[in-house]
Image (cartoon, rainbow, N blue to C red):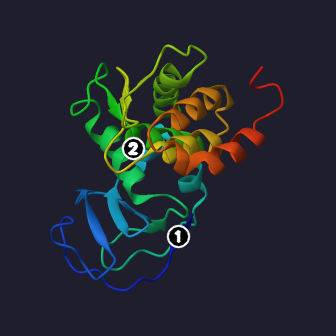
């Protein structure tokens, strides 16, 4: 994650229906009075330092330590920061929750897997504590030690009261999320349900390897 000093000019798109140069698109989370631009993959977001700093101590410290003479992106009049290694889709989900709160997703509503993944991954990396805590509670509610907490349909779809799978994700994404973030208490139930659905033969070698890598005693 580092400031970008000079970039090619991006013309005047206002959203992804009106993109800029090939490979770059503005998110709908683009505020004219925003004072920092985040780029995750090929998506750019114009947001507010104060809003990000309010929720993320990591970003707050980054802004405080930034050079006063940090180069300004000439096309927009504010710095652009590249969010290395992050998914644009996950930043879109997290920023939507930050800016719109639960006006679109109420606290009692079921969240999609991409929302849970964004809150967990970015919450862990940048210290969005409240979002990570909410997502972790929902994730462990589905995949915690109680093996009766989750229901999987015949096609492998997750069906819980607090989380559902969106069309663009699969059980491999659930496995990767739990494994990458070392959510060890959830791994046994995730592996069990993953190999239980109809695509189990395809995943057999992957899950054998995953089980072999589980911490000692986790399955006891």
Which of marks 2 and 1 precedes in the sequence? 1
| Residue ID for mark 2 | 114
Residue closest to the eye, 9 or 154: 154
Visible in this render: residue 57?
Answer: no
Residue furthest to the bottom: 8
Coordinates of residue 48 in the picture (x, y in percent): 36, 52
Q: Are marks 1 and 2 in contact (CB under 8 Å)?
A: no
For disc 1, the neighbor class at 10 Å (few under 14, some 14 to 19, many from 20) is some
Q: CA distance from mark 1 to mark 2?
A: 27 Å
Instruction: Tell me the quadrant of the picture where the C terminus can be found.
Output: top right
Q: Secondary structure at mark 1?
A: strand
Coordinates of residue 208 in the picture (x, y in percent): 69, 44
Residue occupying the point 29% across, 82% down: 22
Residue occupying the point 64% across, 28% down: 188
Residue occupying the point 61% across, 57% down: 65
Q: Secondary structure at mark 2?
A: helix
In the rendered structure, find residue 3 and report the number of the disc placed on it: 1
Residue closest to the eye, 97 or 3: 97
Left or right: residue 183 versus residue 63 is right
Residue furthest to the right: 216
Coordinates of residue 145 in the picture (x, y in percent): 61, 17
Coordinates of residue 125 in the picture (x, y in percent): 59, 47
Left or right: residue 37 versus residue 126 is left
Residue occupying the point 33% across, 72% down: 77
- Position of residue 214 relative to residue 86, above or below, is above
In the rendered structure, find residue 202 and report the number of the disc placed on it: none
């Amino acid at each position: 994650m580092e400031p970008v000093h000079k970039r090619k000019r991006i013309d005047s798109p206002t959203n992804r229906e009106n993109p800029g140069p090939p490979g770059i698109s503005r998110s709908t989370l683009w505020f004219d009075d925003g004072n920092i631009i985040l780029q995750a993959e090929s998506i750019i977001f114009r947001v507010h330092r104060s809003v990000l700093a309010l929720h993320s101590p990591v970003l707050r410290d980054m802004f405080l330590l930034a050079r006063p003479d940090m180069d300004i992106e000439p096309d927009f009049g504010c710095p652009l920061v590249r969010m290395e290694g992050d998914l644009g889709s996950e930043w879109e989900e997290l920023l939507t929750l930050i800016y719109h709160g639960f006006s679109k997703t109420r606290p009692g509503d079921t969240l999609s897997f991409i929302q849970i993944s964004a809150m967990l991954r970015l919450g862990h990396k940048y210290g969005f504590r409240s979002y990570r805590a909410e997502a972790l509670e929902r994730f462990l509610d589905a995949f915690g030690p109680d093996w009766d907490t989750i229901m999987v349909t015949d096609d492998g779809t997750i069906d819980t009261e607090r989380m559902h799978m969106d069309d663009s994700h699969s059980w491999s994404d659930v496995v990767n999320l739990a494994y990458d973030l070392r959510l060890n208490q959830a791994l046994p139930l995730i592996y069990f349900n993953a190999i239980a659905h109809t695509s189990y033969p395809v995943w057999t070698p992957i899950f054998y390897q995953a089980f072999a890598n589980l911490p000692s005693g986790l399955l006891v």
